[in-house]
Image (tube, rainbow, N blue to C red):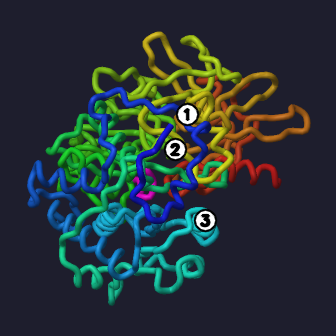
Amino acid sequence: MELSPTSHVDEFTRESLPPFEQWPTLEFTLPELQYPDRLNAAVELLDRTIERFGAERPALLLPDGGSWSYGELQRRANQFARVLVEDHGIVPGNRVLLRMPNSAWAVACWFGALKAGAVVVTTMVAWREIEIERVVAKVKPDLAVVDHRHLEPVGRVLEAAVGADGILVAGGAEDPLGAACDRKPGDFEAVDTAADDVALLGATSGTTGKPKVTMHFHRDILAIADTFAKHILRLTEHDVSASTAPLAFTFGLGGSVVFPLRSGGATVLAEQSGPLQLADLIEPLGITVLYTAPTGYRNLLKEDRADQLRRLRLGVSAGEHLSLETYEAVEAATGLRLVNGIGSTEMLHVFISAAGDDIKPGATGRAVPGYRATILDADGNELPPGEMGRLAVIGPTGCRYLDDPRQADYVSGGWNVTGDTYLMDEDGYFFFQARSDSLIVTAGYNVGAPEVEEAIESHPDVKECAVIGRDDPVRGVIVGAFVVPRDGVAGDDALTASILEHAKARIAVYKCPRRIDYIDALPRNPSGKVQHFVLRERAAAE
């Protein structure tokens, strides 16, 4: 395998790629995936879209009713690229870390960094000092752009990494970022990057507690739009997108930036972007496509927001398993058939999904055009339909960890092995069974935690729950549930008895929890995924 000549003066990321023998197989089977050797994702998403639709077209819609046009976004991105190069000496291949909430300026900085040939490191504003410190130690940033409200508590870590002059503060009374950009003209000649130059570094969502850093090329950013967004969502210039996920989470980056701008549409950017807040914006801002997790849709129904959801063209669900019960409840209340999907930070976005008449309720979907998927046994052999095993996928994107021996755990025989247990039916639809690390073996039975969670969460007095395997001196491992009761409901023996009776009517007795603990909220990472490892650590400490 050979890479194109790099534009990077700083070759840190290219030198940190895994050895070729550890790469997954890459396939570019669709005509739209035949990218040229030289490619800058920011130019393709922004400048080329302006050539097609014009600079005055609205691009970024804000909750207060304001907006940025494509032309305004382009001008601000170009100004920021000049600030990077002219004021801070950033050269192609340097890493620019962003610690900013969902905002127009965050998008402008993302585009500007790519235009300058830099590698963007997206981080969550919710991360604390140690979380930032671990990522900084791996990616070695050269400059950090930080919202003034989120400089603490990580300022010490960032200053140690890039120096005081390497931190560019956004917002506040003086707004150094805005002032620096205002001093620059609005044109910039983008760096002629290679299609396989690294453009983006993204930390995994950390379900193990030890995030890995994934590496994505300029062409990868376009590929997720030219597969999932084009063939499944069928986005057009008339769509207005909104996502509850932060831009630092690749699910949010795709839904809020890459997909809408590739299609010429608009996107809603709100710092307060929970499901309820975005639901209130559906009508006033004309949102047609909403991206959120199944938990978000369940909460919207519980808060009687079905009327708002009915106005959508598409509801997209990812980030965690979409249960059949949630799917059916949303459809019954709104007529909306949720687009289920599974993606990963390693693959950048969704690779199995289905929409419209292709949806098979209960299934995640089929391989997105441009990808192929299969089920592998423990030895790496492909399994026939109907047998449970490890989900594996190949396509135009694939796992490349930054200097990490765990690369060999994710890639096997050319396949990206996601860590999910699935089965595939005769029609090529994939049905989620469990995360491989959430498969509980108790009394000789295999129990998928999501199935138990689904049964418990259907109880009217349960807000949400998470299920783990707990060590037990008699039985070895038992099924344990952490339950968040609905507001005003006491987590007591009466509720426990009611939940168990409810669960036994829906799943086999051996799958039912033998212990239920009540907590105020489930531990989640900044992207919204439940951190089962935190609950396992808590259980082990008791």
Q: Secondary structure at mark 1?
A: strand
Relative vertical location of residue 329 with respect to residue 407 in this rendering, above or below: above
- Give the class, few, some or many, for how many residues have Cα within 10 Å of label 3's Cα (few <14, many ≥20): some
Among the two numbered marks 3 and 2 on one chain, the one whose residue lies closer to the N terminus: 3
Q: Is residue 43 left or right of residue 472?
A: left
Asked if the residue at tag 2 contacts the one at tag 1, i.e. Cβ–Cβ closer than 8 Å, the answer is yes
Q: Is residue 500 left or right of residue 472?
A: left
Q: CA distance from mark 1 to mark 3?
A: 26 Å
Among the two numbered marks 1 and 3 on one chain, the one whose residue lies closer to the N terminus: 3
- Give the class, few, some or many, for how many residues have Cα within 10 Å of label 1's Cα (few <14, many ≥20): many
Residue 95 percent across, percent down from the top left: 47, 66
- Which amino acid is tagged 3? Glu
Q: Which residues are magenta?
A: 245-250
- Which amino acid is tagged 2? Glu
Tell me, yes or no, whether the highlighted magenta stretch contains residue 248: yes
Residue ID for mark 1: 416
Seen as rendered, the residue at the extreme bottom is 174
Q: Main secondary structure of the magenta part?
A: loop
Residue 444 percent across, percent down from the top left: 80, 22
Q: CA distance from mark 3 to mark 2?
A: 19 Å
- Give the class, few, some or many, for how many residues have Cα within 10 Å of label 2's Cα (few <14, many ≥20): many
- Which amino acid is tagged 1? Asn
Residue 404 percent across, percent down from the top left: 65, 51
- Numbered label attached to residue 131: 3
**Nearer to me, 394 or 22:** 22
For the question of whether residue 449 can be seen, the reply is yes
Q: Secondary structure at mark 3?
A: helix
Residue ID for mark 2: 346
Q: Residue at x 11, y 59 (%)?
A: 55
